[in-house]
Image: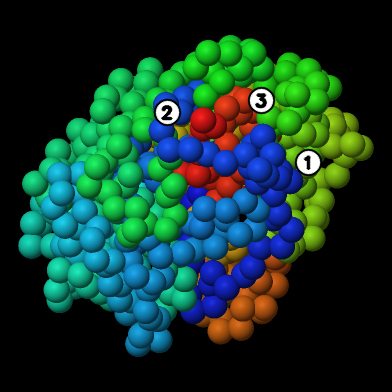
Amino acid sequence: MRQRRVGLALGAALGLLSVAGCTGSDSGVAGGPSAAPVKGGTLHVLSTLDLEHLDPARNYVTSSQDVSRLIYRTLTTFAAAPGQAGGKIVPDLATDTGRPSDGARTWTFTLKPGVKFEDGRPITSADVKYGVERTFAAELPEGPPYARMWLVGGDSYKGPYKDPAGLASIETPDDNTVVFHLKQPVADFGSAASLPMFAPVPQDKDTGVNYDSRPFSSGPYKIDGFDPKKQLTLVRNTDWDPAADTVRKAMPDKVVIDLGLDAAVVDQRLIAGQGEDANAVAMEPIGPASVGRVLNDPRLKSRLVTGDSINTRYLSINTRHKPLDDVRVRQAVAYALDKDALRTTRGGPIAGDLATSLLPPSLGYPAEDPYPSKDGKGDPDKAKALLAEAGHASDLTLTLDAPATATGKAQAEAVQASLGRAGITVKINEISSSAFYSTVGNTSQEHDLVIAGWSPDWPGASTYLPIVFDGRLITAQGNNNYAQYDSPTVDAQIDTIAAMGDPAAAQAAYGQLAEQIMRDAPVVPFLWDKAPILVGPNVTGAYGQVAYVGRLDLVSLGLRK
Protein backbone atom coordinates (compact mmCIF):
# COMPACT_ATOMS: atom_id res chain seq x y z
CA MET A 1 0.00 0.00 0.00
CA ARG A 2 2.85 2.17 -0.23
CA GLN A 3 -0.35 1.44 0.70
CA ARG A 4 -0.02 4.91 1.60
CA ARG A 5 -2.72 7.37 1.01
CA VAL A 6 -0.34 9.94 -0.29
CA GLY A 7 -0.27 12.69 -2.83
CA LEU A 8 -0.22 16.40 -3.49
CA ALA A 9 -2.71 19.07 -4.35
CA LEU A 10 -0.69 21.95 -5.71
CA GLY A 11 -3.00 24.64 -6.98
CA ALA A 12 -6.37 26.31 -7.16
CA ALA A 13 -7.71 23.71 -9.57
CA LEU A 14 -6.56 20.71 -7.61
CA GLY A 15 -8.64 18.40 -5.49
CA LEU A 16 -11.77 19.25 -7.45
CA LEU A 17 -11.68 16.01 -9.40
CA SER A 18 -14.44 13.60 -8.41
CA VAL A 19 -14.41 9.86 -7.92
CA ALA A 20 -16.32 7.86 -10.49
CA GLY A 21 -17.41 4.30 -9.86
CA CYS A 22 -16.06 3.95 -6.32
CA THR A 23 -19.12 2.30 -4.89
CA GLY A 24 -18.72 -0.40 -2.30
CA SER A 25 -19.72 -3.91 -3.30
CA ASP A 26 -20.78 -4.94 0.19
CA SER A 27 -24.11 -4.34 1.88
CA GLY A 28 -22.47 -1.87 4.22
CA VAL A 29 -22.99 -3.94 7.36
CA ALA A 30 -21.48 -7.35 7.98
CA GLY A 31 -24.13 -9.91 8.86
CA GLY A 32 -26.88 -8.07 7.01
CA PRO A 33 -28.45 -4.62 7.10
CA SER A 34 -30.48 -5.37 10.23
CA ALA A 35 -27.48 -6.30 12.37
CA ALA A 36 -27.18 -3.52 14.95
CA PRO A 37 -24.10 -3.16 17.15
CA VAL A 38 -24.34 -2.69 20.90
CA LYS A 39 -21.94 -0.84 23.13
CA GLY A 40 -19.36 -2.97 24.88
CA GLY A 41 -17.12 -5.99 24.38
CA THR A 42 -13.64 -6.42 22.96
CA LEU A 43 -13.01 -6.15 19.23
CA HIS A 44 -10.03 -8.16 17.98
CA VAL A 45 -8.13 -7.11 14.85
CA LEU A 46 -5.83 -9.71 13.29
CA SER A 47 -3.01 -8.24 11.21
CA THR A 48 -0.17 -9.82 9.27
CA LEU A 49 1.58 -6.43 9.31
CA ASP A 50 3.20 -4.32 11.96
CA LEU A 51 2.23 -0.69 12.51
CA GLU A 52 5.12 1.18 10.97
CA HIS A 53 4.39 4.49 12.73
CA LEU A 54 1.73 5.81 15.10
CA ASP A 55 3.36 9.22 15.60
CA PRO A 56 1.11 11.57 13.59
CA ALA A 57 4.16 13.34 12.18
CA ARG A 58 5.42 10.05 10.71
CA ASN A 59 2.19 8.16 10.02
CA TYR A 60 1.85 7.95 6.24
CA VAL A 61 0.89 4.31 5.65
CA THR A 62 -2.72 3.33 5.10
CA SER A 63 -3.05 0.56 7.69
CA SER A 64 -1.47 2.72 10.40
CA GLN A 65 -3.71 5.65 9.50
CA ASP A 66 -6.79 3.44 9.73
CA VAL A 67 -5.77 2.42 13.26
CA SER A 68 -4.73 5.91 14.33
CA ARG A 69 -8.20 7.30 13.58
CA LEU A 70 -9.26 5.46 16.74
CA ILE A 71 -6.57 7.24 18.81
CA TYR A 72 -6.34 10.80 17.58
CA ARG A 73 -8.37 13.26 15.59
CA THR A 74 -7.43 15.68 12.83
CA LEU A 75 -8.90 18.99 11.70
CA THR A 76 -10.93 17.16 9.05
CA THR A 77 -11.35 13.49 8.23
CA PHE A 78 -13.05 11.04 5.88
CA ALA A 79 -16.73 10.30 6.30
CA ALA A 80 -17.55 7.01 7.99
CA ALA A 81 -19.39 5.45 5.07
CA PRO A 82 -19.00 2.70 2.46
CA GLY A 83 -18.29 3.31 -1.20
CA GLN A 84 -17.91 6.71 -2.80
CA ALA A 85 -19.41 8.46 0.25
CA GLY A 86 -16.36 7.39 2.30
CA GLY A 87 -14.16 9.62 0.14
CA LYS A 88 -15.95 12.76 1.31
CA ILE A 89 -14.00 15.09 3.59
CA VAL A 90 -15.98 16.14 6.69
CA PRO A 91 -15.16 18.22 9.79
CA ASP A 92 -13.43 16.44 12.67
CA LEU A 93 -11.79 18.62 15.33
CA ALA A 94 -12.76 21.67 13.31
CA THR A 95 -16.27 23.06 12.94
CA ASP A 96 -16.02 22.91 9.16
CA THR A 97 -13.59 21.84 6.42
CA GLY A 98 -11.72 25.14 6.53
CA ARG A 99 -12.43 28.66 5.33
CA PRO A 100 -10.18 29.88 2.50
CA SER A 101 -9.35 33.53 1.83
CA ASP A 102 -6.79 35.49 -0.15
CA GLY A 103 -7.40 33.28 -3.19
CA ALA A 104 -7.00 30.05 -1.14
CA ARG A 105 -3.61 31.18 0.19
CA THR A 106 -4.95 31.54 3.72
CA TRP A 107 -6.99 28.87 5.52
CA THR A 108 -8.74 29.31 8.85
CA PHE A 109 -10.08 26.55 11.11
CA THR A 110 -12.10 26.89 14.32
CA LEU A 111 -11.98 24.05 16.84
CA LYS A 112 -15.21 22.53 18.12
CA PRO A 113 -16.09 23.23 21.75
CA GLY A 114 -15.62 20.37 24.18
CA VAL A 115 -12.73 18.57 22.44
CA LYS A 116 -10.21 17.22 24.96
CA PHE A 117 -7.09 15.12 25.34
CA GLU A 118 -7.10 11.93 27.35
CA ASP A 119 -6.14 13.77 30.55
CA GLY A 120 -9.16 16.06 30.28
CA ARG A 121 -7.33 19.20 29.21
CA PRO A 122 -8.93 21.13 26.30
CA ILE A 123 -7.36 20.77 22.88
CA THR A 124 -6.20 24.19 21.70
CA SER A 125 -5.03 25.74 18.47
CA ALA A 126 -1.49 25.76 19.91
CA ASP A 127 -1.60 21.95 20.09
CA VAL A 128 -2.54 21.77 16.39
CA LYS A 129 0.18 24.27 15.47
CA TYR A 130 2.79 22.29 17.41
CA GLY A 131 1.67 19.03 15.81
CA VAL A 132 2.21 20.44 12.32
CA GLU A 133 5.55 22.02 13.29
CA ARG A 134 6.86 18.63 14.44
CA THR A 135 6.62 17.38 10.83
CA PHE A 136 9.57 19.65 9.96
CA ALA A 137 11.91 17.91 12.43
CA ALA A 138 14.71 15.92 10.82
CA GLU A 139 14.21 13.27 13.49
CA LEU A 140 10.70 12.54 12.13
CA PRO A 141 11.26 12.17 8.37
CA GLU A 142 8.64 9.77 7.06
CA GLY A 143 5.55 11.97 6.93
CA PRO A 144 3.96 13.87 4.04
CA PRO A 145 5.73 16.93 2.59
CA TYR A 146 2.75 19.30 2.50
CA ALA A 147 3.78 21.61 5.33
CA ARG A 148 7.30 22.28 4.09
CA MET A 149 6.04 22.71 0.53
CA TRP A 150 3.06 24.96 1.14
CA LEU A 151 3.55 26.99 4.31
CA VAL A 152 5.31 30.33 4.08
CA GLY A 153 8.79 29.82 5.50
CA GLY A 154 8.47 26.06 5.33
CA ASP A 155 11.52 25.68 3.12
CA SER A 156 13.85 26.89 5.89
CA TYR A 157 12.09 25.98 9.15
CA LYS A 158 13.79 23.12 11.02
CA GLY A 159 11.05 22.12 13.46
CA PRO A 160 10.39 22.91 17.14
CA TYR A 161 13.35 20.97 18.53
CA LYS A 162 15.81 23.28 16.77
CA ASP A 163 13.60 26.35 16.46
CA PRO A 164 11.23 26.50 19.46
CA ALA A 165 9.99 29.95 18.39
CA GLY A 166 7.78 28.14 15.90
CA LEU A 167 6.64 28.83 12.35
CA ALA A 168 5.13 32.30 11.90
CA SER A 169 2.92 31.18 9.00
CA ILE A 170 0.78 29.15 11.46
CA GLU A 171 -1.09 31.66 13.59
CA THR A 172 -3.16 31.01 16.72
CA PRO A 173 -5.06 34.25 17.42
CA ASP A 174 -6.97 32.49 20.20
CA ASP A 175 -7.26 29.02 21.73
CA ASN A 176 -9.90 27.92 19.25
CA THR A 177 -8.58 29.35 15.97
CA VAL A 178 -5.65 28.26 13.80
CA VAL A 179 -4.70 30.05 10.59
CA PHE A 180 -2.36 28.69 7.89
CA HIS A 181 -0.63 31.06 5.45
CA LEU A 182 0.42 29.35 2.21
CA LYS A 183 2.92 30.31 -0.49
CA GLN A 184 0.42 29.44 -3.24
CA PRO A 185 -3.28 28.80 -3.72
CA VAL A 186 -4.32 25.32 -2.55
CA ALA A 187 -7.99 24.71 -3.21
CA ASP A 188 -8.17 21.46 -1.26
CA PHE A 189 -6.13 22.32 1.81
CA GLY A 190 -9.17 21.27 3.82
CA SER A 191 -8.69 17.75 2.43
CA ALA A 192 -5.00 17.76 3.36
CA ALA A 193 -6.06 18.64 6.92
CA SER A 194 -7.43 15.07 7.22
CA LEU A 195 -3.89 13.67 7.40
CA PRO A 196 -2.38 12.62 10.75
CA MET A 197 0.10 15.50 10.52
CA PHE A 198 -2.84 17.77 11.43
CA ALA A 199 -3.52 15.96 14.72
CA PRO A 200 -2.92 17.96 17.92
CA VAL A 201 0.15 17.15 19.99
CA PRO A 202 0.59 18.69 23.49
CA GLN A 203 4.15 19.95 23.69
CA ASP A 204 4.68 18.71 27.25
CA LYS A 205 3.82 15.16 26.15
CA ASP A 206 6.13 15.13 23.13
CA THR A 207 8.89 12.56 23.61
CA GLY A 208 10.50 12.98 20.20
CA VAL A 209 11.12 9.70 18.38
CA ASN A 210 9.63 7.84 21.35
CA TYR A 211 6.25 9.50 20.77
CA ASP A 212 5.79 6.82 18.11
CA SER A 213 4.98 4.22 20.75
CA ARG A 214 2.63 6.35 22.86
CA PRO A 215 0.89 9.22 21.07
CA PHE A 216 -1.44 11.17 23.36
CA SER A 217 -5.10 10.48 22.66
CA SER A 218 -7.61 12.99 21.33
CA GLY A 219 -9.92 10.26 20.03
CA PRO A 220 -12.25 7.69 21.59
CA TYR A 221 -9.46 5.28 22.59
CA LYS A 222 -6.11 5.63 24.31
CA ILE A 223 -3.15 3.27 24.28
CA ASP A 224 -3.15 0.82 27.18
CA GLY A 225 -0.20 -1.18 25.90
CA PHE A 226 1.92 -1.37 22.75
CA ASP A 227 4.42 -4.12 22.01
CA PRO A 228 5.65 -3.41 18.45
CA LYS A 229 5.33 -6.35 16.06
CA LYS A 230 3.15 -8.13 18.62
CA GLN A 231 0.13 -6.27 19.97
CA LEU A 232 -1.53 -2.89 20.42
CA THR A 233 -4.25 -2.61 23.08
CA LEU A 234 -6.65 0.33 23.12
CA VAL A 235 -9.10 1.18 25.89
CA ARG A 236 -11.70 3.91 26.17
CA ASN A 237 -10.63 7.51 26.52
CA THR A 238 -13.22 8.64 29.05
CA ASP A 239 -12.55 12.30 28.20
CA TRP A 240 -13.64 11.84 24.58
CA ASP A 241 -17.04 13.45 24.02
CA PRO A 242 -19.21 11.65 21.44
CA ALA A 243 -21.30 14.80 21.09
CA ALA A 244 -18.25 16.54 19.61
CA ASP A 245 -17.44 13.68 17.22
CA THR A 246 -19.89 12.80 14.45
CA VAL A 247 -17.58 10.26 12.77
CA ARG A 248 -16.42 7.70 15.34
CA LYS A 249 -18.95 5.23 16.78
CA ALA A 250 -16.63 3.87 19.53
CA MET A 251 -18.85 0.85 20.23
CA PRO A 252 -16.34 -1.67 21.72
CA ASP A 253 -14.93 -1.07 25.18
CA LYS A 254 -11.55 -2.35 24.07
CA VAL A 255 -9.75 -2.94 20.77
CA VAL A 256 -6.90 -5.47 20.67
CA ILE A 257 -4.79 -5.53 17.52
CA ASP A 258 -2.53 -8.55 17.10
CA LEU A 259 0.41 -7.83 14.80
CA GLY A 260 2.75 -9.86 12.62
CA LEU A 261 0.49 -12.90 12.36
CA ASP A 262 0.80 -15.57 9.69
CA ALA A 263 -1.69 -14.84 6.90
CA ALA A 264 -2.87 -18.46 6.66
CA VAL A 265 -3.46 -18.56 10.41
CA VAL A 266 -5.54 -15.38 10.26
CA ASP A 267 -7.74 -16.92 7.55
CA GLN A 268 -8.12 -20.17 9.47
CA ARG A 269 -9.10 -18.38 12.67
CA LEU A 270 -11.71 -16.20 11.00
CA ILE A 271 -13.14 -19.06 8.94
CA ALA A 272 -13.65 -21.00 12.18
CA GLY A 273 -14.97 -17.90 13.94
CA GLN A 274 -14.85 -19.49 17.39
CA GLY A 275 -14.21 -17.99 20.82
CA GLU A 276 -12.74 -14.49 20.72
CA ASP A 277 -12.33 -14.86 16.95
CA ALA A 278 -16.11 -14.53 16.64
CA ASN A 279 -15.44 -10.92 17.66
CA ALA A 280 -12.51 -10.47 15.28
CA VAL A 281 -11.80 -8.95 11.88
CA ALA A 282 -8.86 -9.24 9.53
CA MET A 283 -6.79 -6.17 8.74
CA GLU A 284 -5.76 -7.47 5.31
CA PRO A 285 -7.63 -9.29 2.51
CA ILE A 286 -8.07 -13.05 2.62
CA GLY A 287 -5.24 -15.09 1.14
CA PRO A 288 -5.39 -16.84 -2.23
CA ALA A 289 -5.65 -20.31 -0.66
CA SER A 290 -8.83 -19.32 1.21
CA VAL A 291 -10.71 -17.64 -1.65
CA GLY A 292 -12.36 -20.76 -3.04
CA ARG A 293 -13.49 -22.06 0.32
CA VAL A 294 -14.98 -18.71 1.37
CA LEU A 295 -16.77 -18.03 -1.91
CA ASN A 296 -18.25 -21.53 -2.08
CA ASP A 297 -19.63 -21.55 1.46
CA PRO A 298 -22.68 -19.26 1.80
CA ARG A 299 -22.14 -18.85 5.54
CA LEU A 300 -18.56 -17.70 5.05
CA LYS A 301 -19.38 -15.61 2.01
CA SER A 302 -21.95 -13.69 4.08
CA ARG A 303 -19.06 -12.63 6.34
CA LEU A 304 -16.91 -11.39 3.44
CA VAL A 305 -16.87 -7.62 3.02
CA THR A 306 -15.39 -6.42 -0.27
CA GLY A 307 -14.39 -2.78 -0.46
CA ASP A 308 -13.36 -0.82 -3.53
CA SER A 309 -10.34 1.45 -3.47
CA ILE A 310 -8.50 3.98 -5.61
CA ASN A 311 -5.18 2.23 -5.08
CA THR A 312 -2.82 1.22 -7.88
CA ARG A 313 -0.17 -1.42 -7.16
CA TYR A 314 2.97 -1.29 -9.24
CA LEU A 315 6.54 -2.44 -9.67
CA SER A 316 8.82 0.58 -9.26
CA ILE A 317 12.04 0.72 -11.29
CA ASN A 318 15.01 2.70 -9.96
CA THR A 319 15.83 4.97 -12.90
CA ARG A 320 19.14 6.09 -11.35
CA HIS A 321 20.62 2.61 -11.39
CA LYS A 322 22.39 1.37 -14.50
CA PRO A 323 21.23 -0.06 -16.85
CA LEU A 324 17.74 0.93 -15.66
CA ASP A 325 18.55 4.50 -16.66
CA ASP A 326 17.98 3.26 -20.24
CA VAL A 327 14.27 3.59 -21.06
CA ARG A 328 14.47 0.49 -23.30
CA VAL A 329 15.47 -1.66 -20.33
CA ARG A 330 12.61 -0.27 -18.25
CA GLN A 331 10.18 -0.86 -21.09
CA ALA A 332 11.47 -4.44 -21.34
CA VAL A 333 10.60 -4.94 -17.67
CA ALA A 334 7.13 -3.51 -18.38
CA TYR A 335 6.55 -5.97 -21.20
CA ALA A 336 7.98 -8.93 -19.29
CA LEU A 337 5.93 -8.54 -16.12
CA ASP A 338 3.19 -11.16 -15.67
CA LYS A 339 0.48 -9.08 -14.03
CA ASP A 340 -1.95 -11.97 -13.87
CA ALA A 341 0.55 -14.01 -11.85
CA LEU A 342 0.95 -11.12 -9.44
CA ARG A 343 -2.82 -10.84 -9.05
CA THR A 344 -3.01 -14.58 -8.43
CA THR A 345 -0.68 -14.18 -5.44
CA ARG A 346 -3.30 -11.86 -3.96
CA GLY A 347 -6.27 -14.16 -4.59
CA GLY A 348 -7.06 -13.79 -8.29
CA PRO A 349 -9.85 -11.63 -9.76
CA ILE A 350 -11.42 -11.06 -6.35
CA ALA A 351 -8.33 -8.97 -5.48
CA GLY A 352 -9.03 -6.43 -8.22
CA ASP A 353 -8.58 -5.67 -11.90
CA LEU A 354 -5.32 -5.89 -13.83
CA ALA A 355 -3.82 -2.39 -14.01
CA THR A 356 -2.54 -1.10 -17.32
CA SER A 357 -2.10 2.60 -16.51
CA LEU A 358 -1.24 4.77 -13.54
CA LEU A 359 -4.63 6.37 -12.87
CA PRO A 360 -7.39 3.87 -12.08
CA PRO A 361 -10.72 4.05 -13.92
CA SER A 362 -12.33 4.73 -10.52
CA LEU A 363 -10.87 8.24 -10.81
CA GLY A 364 -12.63 8.72 -14.14
CA TYR A 365 -9.74 7.92 -16.49
CA PRO A 366 -9.69 5.47 -19.43
CA ALA A 367 -7.61 2.32 -19.03
CA GLU A 368 -4.71 2.88 -21.45
CA ASP A 369 -2.32 -0.01 -22.11
CA PRO A 370 1.05 1.06 -23.54
CA TYR A 371 2.69 -2.34 -22.86
CA PRO A 372 0.01 -4.85 -23.85
CA SER A 373 0.17 -8.61 -23.51
CA LYS A 374 -2.37 -11.39 -23.87
CA ASP A 375 -4.44 -11.70 -20.69
CA GLY A 376 -1.90 -9.58 -18.85
CA LYS A 377 0.58 -12.46 -18.74
CA GLY A 378 3.52 -10.55 -20.19
CA ASP A 379 5.31 -10.56 -23.52
CA PRO A 380 8.80 -12.01 -22.95
CA ASP A 381 9.66 -11.96 -26.66
CA LYS A 382 9.05 -8.21 -26.89
CA ALA A 383 11.04 -7.75 -23.70
CA LYS A 384 13.97 -9.78 -25.07
CA ALA A 385 14.02 -7.71 -28.25
CA LEU A 386 14.23 -4.46 -26.28
CA LEU A 387 16.96 -5.84 -24.02
CA ALA A 388 19.01 -6.94 -27.06
CA GLU A 389 18.58 -3.49 -28.59
CA ALA A 390 19.89 -1.98 -25.35
CA GLY A 391 22.85 -4.37 -25.28
CA HIS A 392 21.64 -6.53 -22.38
CA ALA A 393 20.50 -9.73 -24.02
CA SER A 394 21.87 -12.04 -21.33
CA ASP A 395 23.69 -10.25 -18.53
CA LEU A 396 21.02 -8.38 -16.61
CA THR A 397 20.68 -9.07 -12.86
CA LEU A 398 18.40 -6.94 -10.69
CA THR A 399 17.63 -6.87 -6.96
CA LEU A 400 14.01 -6.60 -5.85
CA ASP A 401 12.99 -5.14 -2.48
CA ALA A 402 9.89 -6.86 -1.08
CA PRO A 403 8.12 -7.04 2.29
CA ALA A 404 9.03 -10.10 4.37
CA THR A 405 5.45 -11.35 4.50
CA ALA A 406 3.86 -14.36 2.86
CA THR A 407 2.16 -12.18 0.26
CA GLY A 408 5.30 -10.11 -0.24
CA LYS A 409 7.37 -13.21 -0.85
CA ALA A 410 4.78 -14.66 -3.25
CA GLN A 411 4.68 -11.41 -5.21
CA ALA A 412 8.46 -11.24 -5.33
CA GLU A 413 8.67 -14.79 -6.66
CA ALA A 414 6.04 -13.96 -9.31
CA VAL A 415 8.18 -11.01 -10.45
CA GLN A 416 11.27 -13.21 -10.40
CA ALA A 417 9.62 -15.88 -12.56
CA SER A 418 8.05 -13.53 -15.10
CA LEU A 419 11.19 -11.44 -15.64
CA GLY A 420 13.20 -14.63 -15.78
CA ARG A 421 11.33 -15.63 -18.93
CA ALA A 422 12.90 -12.58 -20.60
CA GLY A 423 16.39 -13.52 -19.38
CA ILE A 424 16.44 -11.10 -16.42
CA THR A 425 17.78 -12.59 -13.20
CA VAL A 426 16.01 -11.21 -10.12
CA LYS A 427 17.45 -11.47 -6.63
CA ILE A 428 14.95 -10.97 -3.80
CA ASN A 429 15.79 -8.76 -0.83
CA GLU A 430 13.21 -9.33 1.91
CA ILE A 431 12.65 -6.47 4.36
CA SER A 432 10.67 -6.57 7.61
CA SER A 433 7.20 -5.10 7.09
CA SER A 434 7.76 -2.77 10.07
CA ALA A 435 10.77 -1.19 8.32
CA PHE A 436 9.88 -1.69 4.67
CA TYR A 437 8.89 1.84 3.69
CA SER A 438 11.58 3.44 5.83
CA THR A 439 14.14 1.29 4.02
CA VAL A 440 12.98 1.70 0.43
CA GLY A 441 12.32 5.37 1.19
CA ASN A 442 16.04 5.79 1.87
CA THR A 443 17.62 6.47 -1.52
CA SER A 444 20.95 4.97 -0.47
CA GLN A 445 19.37 1.69 0.68
CA GLU A 446 16.79 1.12 -2.06
CA HIS A 447 17.74 -1.45 -4.70
CA ASP A 448 16.68 -1.81 -8.36
CA LEU A 449 13.06 -2.80 -8.04
CA VAL A 450 10.41 -2.23 -5.37
CA ILE A 451 6.94 -3.74 -5.04
CA ALA A 452 4.85 -0.74 -4.04
CA GLY A 453 1.48 0.89 -4.41
CA TRP A 454 -0.17 4.26 -4.21
CA SER A 455 -3.56 5.43 -3.06
CA PRO A 456 -4.30 9.16 -3.14
CA ASP A 457 -4.61 11.04 0.11
CA TRP A 458 -8.06 11.99 -1.11
CA PRO A 459 -9.77 11.18 -4.44
CA GLY A 460 -8.25 12.88 -7.45
CA ALA A 461 -5.20 12.71 -9.71
CA SER A 462 -3.72 15.76 -8.00
CA THR A 463 -2.98 13.61 -4.97
CA TYR A 464 -1.20 10.95 -7.00
CA LEU A 465 1.11 12.02 -9.81
CA PRO A 466 3.04 14.96 -8.29
CA ILE A 467 4.39 13.27 -5.19
CA VAL A 468 5.21 9.97 -6.90
CA PHE A 469 6.91 11.41 -9.98
CA ASP A 470 8.05 14.99 -9.27
CA GLY A 471 11.84 14.75 -9.27
CA ARG A 472 12.11 17.85 -7.08
CA LEU A 473 10.53 15.92 -4.21
CA ILE A 474 13.14 13.15 -4.07
CA THR A 475 14.59 13.13 -0.55
CA ALA A 476 17.40 11.11 1.02
CA GLN A 477 15.00 9.72 3.66
CA GLY A 478 11.24 9.41 3.63
CA ASN A 479 11.32 9.40 -0.17
CA ASN A 480 8.11 8.45 -1.97
CA ASN A 481 9.45 8.57 -5.53
CA TYR A 482 10.88 5.05 -5.44
CA ALA A 483 11.70 5.21 -9.15
CA GLN A 484 13.82 8.29 -8.34
CA TYR A 485 12.30 9.52 -11.58
CA ASP A 486 13.49 13.04 -12.43
CA SER A 487 12.11 14.54 -15.63
CA PRO A 488 12.27 18.35 -16.00
CA THR A 489 9.57 18.08 -18.67
CA VAL A 490 7.21 16.28 -16.29
CA ASP A 491 8.04 18.67 -13.44
CA ALA A 492 7.21 21.66 -15.66
CA GLN A 493 3.89 20.08 -16.64
CA ILE A 494 3.03 19.50 -12.98
CA ASP A 495 3.51 23.23 -12.39
CA THR A 496 1.41 24.09 -15.43
CA ILE A 497 -1.50 21.94 -14.21
CA ALA A 498 -1.21 23.46 -10.73
CA ALA A 499 -1.85 26.89 -12.23
CA MET A 500 -4.99 25.84 -14.11
CA GLY A 501 -8.24 27.35 -12.93
CA ASP A 502 -10.52 24.96 -14.82
CA PRO A 503 -11.01 21.61 -13.01
CA ALA A 504 -12.04 19.81 -16.22
CA ALA A 505 -8.92 21.04 -17.99
CA ALA A 506 -6.77 19.98 -15.03
CA GLN A 507 -8.33 16.52 -15.05
CA ALA A 508 -7.65 16.08 -18.77
CA ALA A 509 -4.10 17.38 -18.38
CA TYR A 510 -3.37 14.90 -15.61
CA GLY A 511 -4.53 12.09 -17.88
CA GLN A 512 -2.14 13.25 -20.59
CA LEU A 513 0.66 13.58 -18.05
CA ALA A 514 0.07 10.02 -16.85
CA GLU A 515 0.39 8.75 -20.42
CA GLN A 516 3.62 10.72 -20.84
CA ILE A 517 5.09 9.22 -17.66
CA MET A 518 4.09 5.71 -18.71
CA ARG A 519 6.11 6.06 -21.92
CA ASP A 520 9.19 6.50 -19.70
CA ALA A 521 8.20 3.37 -17.71
CA PRO A 522 9.46 4.38 -14.24
CA VAL A 523 6.85 2.04 -12.78
CA VAL A 524 4.78 -0.88 -14.07
CA PRO A 525 1.20 -0.84 -12.76
CA PHE A 526 -0.19 -4.34 -12.20
CA LEU A 527 -3.34 -4.16 -10.02
CA TRP A 528 -6.23 -1.84 -9.25
CA ASP A 529 -7.20 -3.04 -5.79
CA LYS A 530 -10.27 -4.45 -4.23
CA ALA A 531 -10.12 -5.63 -0.62
CA PRO A 532 -12.09 -8.78 0.37
CA ILE A 533 -11.95 -8.84 4.18
CA LEU A 534 -13.30 -11.63 6.38
CA VAL A 535 -15.03 -10.71 9.66
CA GLY A 536 -16.15 -12.78 12.62
CA PRO A 537 -19.83 -13.79 13.00
CA ASN A 538 -20.43 -11.35 15.89
CA VAL A 539 -19.01 -8.29 14.11
CA THR A 540 -21.34 -5.58 12.81
CA GLY A 541 -20.94 -2.26 11.03
CA ALA A 542 -18.25 -3.56 8.66
CA TYR A 543 -17.72 -1.92 5.27
CA GLY A 544 -14.80 -1.22 2.99
CA GLN A 545 -13.49 2.35 3.28
CA VAL A 546 -12.31 3.69 -0.07
CA ALA A 547 -9.88 6.05 1.68
CA TYR A 548 -8.10 3.10 3.33
CA VAL A 549 -7.55 0.95 0.24
CA GLY A 550 -10.93 -0.74 0.69
CA ARG A 551 -10.03 -2.09 4.12
CA LEU A 552 -12.48 -1.98 7.00
CA ASP A 553 -13.27 1.38 8.56
CA LEU A 554 -12.35 0.56 12.14
CA VAL A 555 -14.24 3.51 13.61
CA SER A 556 -17.63 1.98 12.71
CA LEU A 557 -17.15 -1.59 13.90
CA GLY A 558 -19.18 -3.04 16.74
CA LEU A 559 -20.30 -6.38 18.17
CA ARG A 560 -23.62 -8.13 18.53
CA LYS A 561 -25.11 -8.51 21.96
Q: Nearer the viewer, mark 2 or mark 1?
A: 2
Residue marked by disc 3: 286
Residue 355 picture location, percent across and down: 75, 45
Q: Which is more foreground, mark 1 or mark 3?
A: 3
From this viewpoint, is residue 280 visible?
yes
Which percent across, then down, holds residue 340?
80, 31
- Reading the image, the residue beneath label 2 is 41
541 with respect to 118 (left or right)? right
Secondary structure at numbered mark 3: loop
Three-letter amino acid code at the position of disc 1: Leu
Q: Where residue 354 is drawn, which disc sits there? A: 1
466 on left or right of 347 = left
Residue at 80 percent across and 55 percent down: it is 367
Q: Identity of the amino acid at label 2?
A: Gly
**Residue 536 shown left or right of residue 370 in the figure:** left
Mark 2 Cα within 10 Å, few/some/many (few <14, many 20+)? Answer: some
